[in-house]
Amino acid sequence: MRHRRKGRVLGRSPAHRKALMRNLSSALFLTERDASLDENAPKVPGRIITTLEKAKEVRPLVEKCITLAKRALPALEEAKKYETSAERGSDEYKKWRKSEQWTQWADARAPYVNAQRRVLQLIGDREAVAVLFDTIAERFTDRPGGYTRIMRLAKPRLGDGGTRAILELVGKNDRVTRSAQRPAFEQDAPESDSAPEAEANTEEETASAN
């Protein structure tokens, strides 16, 4: 019996299971990287296909990383007030580096750097962390939670018949529901449009009678 035991074992040792969760979460974030720089870019960004059990296990980790990145964005905006546009290594940059403005910039940016290090500790992929903070986090600034969805696939996995599922980020691949529009018929034409035609027909009838 598994009293007070949280989560699925997935037939793996603790170290193997932890590495699996890291790889799945990193793979989901990396689908959002620039497609022009990646020859093996996925057809649908922000989506991976795995088994249903794995998707349910990795979902809390993915949402925790997104929450950490989203909460750190205000610190980055605050730090932009004190940054310089000088080129790195120039005299102006060196002067800014020794000024009080750099200290304010570093203090304002500290929560952002701390969040990056925490996410890196969770998933262990620097490129995935960069994609998360630069691309994905801005998309969920106004969303209180629920950044992912799981959709079960009807076709099982070949070999062992495992149930497959899609784990994807919400917002980009959402279905758009549109209400059906009432078709327009000739009899629904406004009376103002038919009035000139009626007057023209009346004039033609009068002329032919004379």
Image (tube, rainbow, N blue to C red):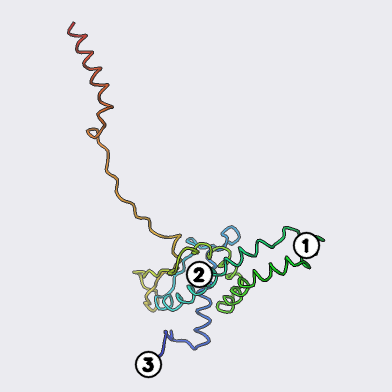
Residue 89, picture quadrant: bottom right
On residue 28, the disc is 2
On residue 93, the disc is 1
Q: Secondary structure at mark 3?
A: loop
Measure the C-alpha gap from mark 2 to mark 1: 37 Å
Q: Is residue 164 visible?
A: yes
Mark 2 residue type? Leu
Give whichever of 178, 13 is nearer the camera.
Answer: 178
Residue 167 located left or right of residue 133: left
Q: Earlier in the sequence, mark 1 or mark 3?
A: 3
Question: Residue 160, relative to residue 95: is it above or below?
Answer: below
Question: Residue 34, relative to residue 181: is it above or below?
Answer: below
Mark 3 residue type? His
Mark 1 residue type? Tyr
Q: Residue at x 67, y 71 (%)?
A: 107
Q: Secondary structure at mark 2?
A: helix
Pick out the residue farthest to the left. 209
Label 1 crowding class (10 Å Cα cut-off): few <14, some 14-19, many 20+? some
Q: Quadrant of the C terminus?
A: top left
Residue 110, picture quadrant: bottom right
Q: Residue at x 72, y 58 (%)?
A: 85
Residue where numbered disc 3 is placed = 3
Question: Residue 33, relative to residue 119: is it above or below?
Answer: above
Measure the C-alpha gap from mark 1 to mark 3: 59 Å
Q: Position of residue 180 (x, y in %)?
A: 29, 48
Label 3 crowding class (10 Å Cα cut-off): few <14, some 14-19, many 20+? few
Q: Earlier in the sequence, mark 2 or mark 3?
A: 3
